[in-house]
Amino acid sequence: MQSSLIIIPTYNEAENISSLFEALFGLHPALQVLVVDDNSPDGTADLVKAAMAHYPNRLFILERQHKVGLGKAYIAGFQWALRRDYEYIFEMDADFSHDPQALPDLYAKLQQADVVVGSRYCRGINVVNWPLSRIALSYFASLYVRLLTGMPIKDPTAGYVGYRREVLQAIALDEIRFVGYAFQIEMKFKAWQLGKTLVEHPIIFKNRELGTSKMNGSIIWEALFGVLFLRLNALFKKKS
């Protein structure tokens, strides 16, 4: 996994972060990690800084003063990565819902594509320990996005994603509008509009065991209405 950076946004992930580092850094000696912490009151950033002594030149932290959304955290991480020499840049949750063991397969797929999506739905429904209502909401939201945008991706809201450097360079990151589920959709949609190749790799998504979910109603509504905005905006640009 040469020239790879894993970006992990955190807010109150002290219960998970140290174990996640152990899992990630055991995968490959060249893999590097950037944590983007939004001033977690539980001391997540302090744990990251302590771990940096054990993983010199492999673990980095970008601290922000306020919690302003997942999308903003990732944009800051992308921009940090683009100022350096990384060729493959991955998004990943801190709570083990994204299995670190899937990273080598995602990396391999990224050698033949521009964007790789760790997909819960490309081979049935692979979600563990979610209530049925949340599975249904996520699955039908993904179907809604596919129908509205035409993107050939079965899990457009997925957050386990890898990008080639040139994809992030081509996307106007400062113009990305959304912060939650809609951020994930918008990034994939922008890449697809640019003619980039998107592929999916099946993963098993596990609900977090430790810590508190950041999901809320406003994030879901942003996704539903955000997709409409993206589609209408694309149509108006074609006509102009």
Image (cartoon, rainbow, N blue to C red):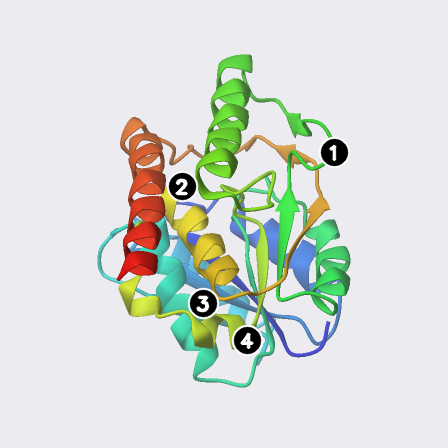
Residue beneath label 2, please? 181
Q: Is residue 198 left or right of residue 215?
A: right
CB of mark 4 within 8 Å of CB of mark 2? no
For the residue carrying disc 3, how many other residues have a C-alpha within 10 Å: few (<14), some (14-19), or many (20+)?
A: some
Amino acid tagged 2: Tyr
Amino acid tagged 1: Arg
- Give me the C-alpha separation between circle 3 and circle 2: 29 Å
Q: Which mark is residue 49?
A: 3
130 up-or-down from 21: above or below: above
Residue beneath label 4, please? 165
Viewer-side residue, 123 vs 82: 123
Comparing labels 2 and 1, the label whose residue is closer to the camera:
1
Residue beneath label 1, please? 123
Comparing labels 3 and 1, the label whose residue is closer to the camera:
1
Q: Is residue 152 left or right of residue 70?
A: right
- Give me the C-alpha separation between circle 3 and circle 4: 26 Å
Q: Which mark is residue 206?
A: none
| SS class, disc 2 | helix
- Mark before the other along the chain sequence, 3 or 4: 3
- Give me the C-alpha separation between circle 4 and circle 2: 22 Å
- Give me the C-alpha separation between circle 3 and circle 1: 39 Å
Q: Quadrant of residue 1?
A: bottom right
Which residue corresponds to the image point at 42% horizontal and 33% vertical from the top-left? 213
Q: Is residue 187 visible?
A: yes
